[in-house]
Amino acid sequence: MNLIVDIGNNSAKFFLFQGKQMLLHTRKTGNLNSVVEEWKKTYTIDKAIISSVIDLAENEKKALDSLGCPVVWFSHATPGPLAIKYGTPDTLGPDRLAAAIGAWSEAEGRNILVIDAGSAITIDFVDNNGNYLGGNISPGIRMRIRALHEFTGKLPLIEKEGNTPFLGNNTETAIRSGIINGICHEMEGYIRATREKYSDVLVFLTGGDENPLKNNIKSRIFADKYLVAKGLNRILLEYSNE
């Protein structure tokens, strides 16, 4: 079985795959050693791959390296199916690249736009020849909510869950609607511009904040919150010789 560990800014996600089939997954905030130890004892893990957008504590690195199986630390230098055309590949977030590989695995040979809505919102493009051409980064939902609160004198800190009318009818809904509807318009603009430039573009939406957004985007999209995990699993299945 393949263990996939996707470590983001706010939590770590653990996935177990048998071939291409996902068997189970869990999310952990804080120190991840307990999950590592539990899964190491409970499951027979043949290979593992770790993707992290943050610097891990030394004890966490040691725990992951001690899984008792070959471990791949995923980066732009890890062999994979895409040709990276990014100008500074060493600064490319591994989650962005893994999501692009996951989308390519679902629609190889197509032009692909990947929208990852998490702490930040990333827009990444892969052409039909498998060239990762790059993308853009903007603040995510929570970051925009917090920025409005912290950089103004009176706007409250609100929850992202709740009503999002077309026009807010109080300060809370005005903030939430302004942010979520604004992000959706932003995404629609990227989708429209990409489809004007490239033919036959498929759009994938993933990330922890995909649910509040997917029903508000009018363009046809494929919502798949496991794109990163699927991309990392493909690396283990096809590009890891260990």
Image (tube, rainbow, N blue to C red):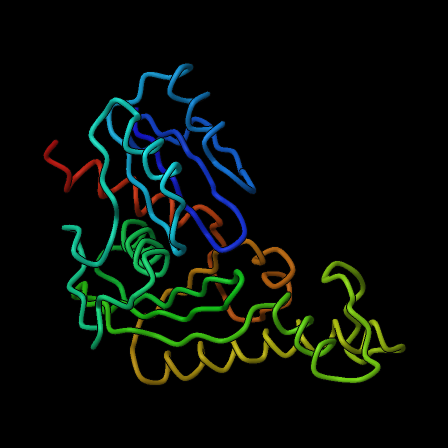
Between 229 and 111, which is closer to the camera in this rendering?
229
- x, y percentage for residue 76? 21, 59
Q: Quadrant of residue 39?
A: top left
Q: Quadrant of the C terminus?
A: top left
- x, y percentage for residue 84? 18, 66
**Residue under the image location 55 percent in, 53 percent down:** 208
**Residue under the image location 42 percent in, 15 percent down:** 42
Between 112 and 39, which is closer to the camera in this rendering?
39
Q: Is residue 211 left or right of residue 57?
A: right
Q: Is residue 105 left or right of residue 170?
A: left
- x, y percentage for residue 158? 78, 66
**Residue reaching furthest to the left:** 241
Q: Is residue 82 left or right of residue 43?
A: left
- x, y percentage for residue 38? 46, 20
Q: Quadrant of the N terminus?
A: top left
**Residue under the image location 53 percent in, 38 percent down:** 27
Q: Quadrant of residue 108?
A: bottom left
In the depicted structure, whether residue 12 falls above or below residue 68: below
